[in-house]
Every structure is written in C-alpha cells, then in structure tokens.
Image (cartoon, grey):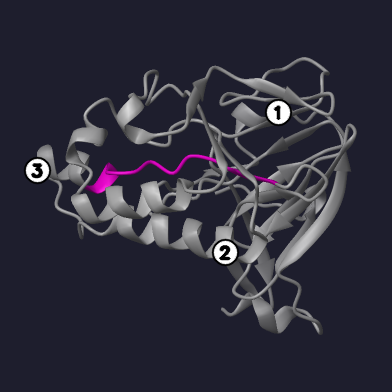
C-alpha cells in the first residue's frame, strides 16, 4: 500500500519541540535540528550484509552503499554544519575493515566541511580514527541527552538502539513501517541502515520508556504519518 495516498498533502517532515530543541522529523528517518544546524541519524549498521555473508547467510552486498546514499541525500537536503550518528553505525568490530573503498570514499566525502560525531553503540563500542570525526559515549544539546541506548528516567533524550517500527491497519490492510517513537520527553529514532529491521513499538521493551504520551510517526512513501498509541497494533 502506498502510504502517501492516505493524506491529502504530502509532508516529508514534521517539526516538534523536545526540551529546548526544535526537532524536524525527516522522512529519511533522520532528525534535523535547525537552530543547531545539526543532523542526527541512528543505527546505520554499515556492513551488516557482509557480516551475515560471513555466517553463510547471503544477502545482496549493497546495504552500505544504499545506506550511505540515503544519508548523503539527507545531508544535501539539509546542509548541516554537524552530523551526529547515535551508535551502531558499524554492524560489528570488523565492519570497518570490510567497508569497501567506494563506501569509505563516500563516507569521507560526506564528512568534509562539517563536524562529524560518532556516538558509540553496543555493536561499535570502538571506532577508529580512520573513519574520521570525533568519537564520544554521548553528549547533551539544549538540555537533551543524545545517546545510543534509551534510558528509563525522566530526563529529555534522543536515542536509537531499538529500531522502532509500527503496525497499523489502513483501508482494511495491516501495514508495518519504521517509525519515530515520540513523547514529550523522549524520541527513539528509527534505524537508517538498509538491513537494520525494526522492533514493534508495542513490544515490552518500549513500555518503560513511554508510560504515557507515545505517538508513532511512520515513514511513508512521501510523507510521515502520526499514529495515536490506541491505533498501534502488535505483530
């Protein structure tokens, strides 16, 4: 089903406030902070395909190129002065070595002329200097914490890790898409990685993070769709 047919006006982004930060939810799955000229992405999982291939699960070996192409298009659209990757940018400790010359070249080209911050994740607890940028465990902007794994306290935060996805019923058919999981104090971002997959926001892992106020913002074909918690379906 083409999600874009469900709305009368195509909207590729939505704007919200989290703490003191103005957030623009982008159709790519990225967040743009216009006041900070900062683009935030989560869970690129570069070289997941080659990791699976090493275990005998053969997938088309184009996930890194596809993910970097999406990231590049998003950067060109927003022209950020800074990019922050919220962890699990590389699928495992060996991903850097498996990253092909072409993808490596694209990554380094995207870093040119802007600050690039890698936040470490559970898949990539260490990132080498060869990948460019600055490596951090986390940081804070405008009173909002940026980290890989979401916490359960009440401090405003933006995180990744859980790869949120939502399932809804539209025109009699069930539809499942990656989504932003959002409340007044928390945003859990969808994974941008081509092979990253998604965990249903009705899963128990989300319950302590969104006790009240959860809305899911589905990534449609040409626009985002805000879905009330009451309409979200389990898998």
Specify whether 108 is left or right of 175: left
Task: State whether residue 231 is above or below residue 185.
Answer: below
Identified at 84% across, 31% down, the residue is 185
Q: Which of the numbered marks, if any, corresponds to residue 207?
A: 1
Task: State whether residue 139 is above or below residue 101.
Answer: above
Residue 195 at least partly seen: no
Q: Which of 85 and 186 is in front in this view?
A: 85
Task: State whether residue 1 is above or below residue 120.
Answer: below
Q: Earlier in the sequence, mark 1 or mark 3?
A: 3
Specify whether 207 is left or right of 200: right
How dense is the environment of label 1, judged by Cα within 10 Å: few (below 14), some, or many (20 and up)? few
Q: Nearer the viewer, residue 51 or 117?
A: 117
User: From which residue to which does the magenta span run?
Assistant: 38-49
Image coords of residue 205 (percent x, y): 60, 27
Helix, strand or loop for disc 2: helix
Do the residues bearing badges 2 and 1 touch, measured as CB atoms within 8 Å? no
Residue 220 in which image quadrant: bottom right
Quickly name the residue at label 2: 76
Do the residues bearing badges 1 and 3 touch, measured as CB atoms within 8 Å? no
Residue 74 at least partly seen: yes
Q: Which of marks 3 and 2 is nearer the N terminus?
A: 3
Residue depth check, mark 1 versus mark 3: number of the one nearer the observer: 3
Identified at 62% across, 24% down, the residue is 147
Do the residues bearing badges 3 and 2 touch, measured as CB atoms within 8 Å? no
Identified at 55% across, 33% down, the residue is 86
Q: Which of the numbered marks, if any, corresponds to residue 56?
A: 3
Image coords of residue 115 (percent x, y): 57, 38
Q: Which of the numbered marks, if any, corresponds to residue 27?
A: none
Between the C-alphas of marks 1 and 3, the distance is 35 Å
Q: Which of 134 and 98 is in front in this view?
A: 134
Between the C-alphas of marks 2 and 1, the distance is 36 Å
């Amino acid at each position: 089903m083409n999600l874009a047919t469900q709305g009368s006006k195509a909207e590729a982004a939505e704007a919200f406030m989290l703490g003191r930060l103005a957030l623009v939810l982008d159709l790519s799955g990225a967040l743009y902070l216009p006041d900070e000229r900062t683009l935030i992405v989560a869970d690129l999982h570069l070289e997941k395909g080659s990791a699976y291939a090493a275990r005998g699960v053969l997938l088309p070996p184009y996930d890194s190129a596809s993910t970097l192409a999406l990231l590049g298009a998003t950067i060109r659209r927003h022209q950020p002065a800074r990019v922050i990757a919220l962890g699990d940018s590389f699928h495992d400790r060996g991903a850097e070595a498996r990253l092909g010359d072409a993808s490596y070249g694209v990554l380094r080209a995207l870093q040119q002329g802007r600050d690039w911050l890698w936040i470490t994740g559970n898949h990539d607890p260490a990132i080498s200097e060869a990948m460019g940028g600055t490596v951090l465990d986390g940081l804070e902007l405008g009173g909002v914490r940026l980290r890989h794994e979401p916490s359960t306290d009440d401090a405003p935060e933006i995180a990744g890790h859980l790869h949120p996805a939502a399932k809804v019923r539209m025109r009699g058919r069930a539809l499942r898409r990656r989504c932003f999981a959002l409340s007044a104090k928390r945003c859990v971002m969808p994974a941008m990685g081509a092979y990253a997959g998604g965990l249903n926001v009705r899963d128990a892992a989300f319950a302590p993070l969104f006790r009240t106020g959860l809305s899911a913002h589905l990534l449609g074909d040409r626009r985002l769709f805000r879905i009330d918690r009451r309409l979200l379906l389990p898998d």
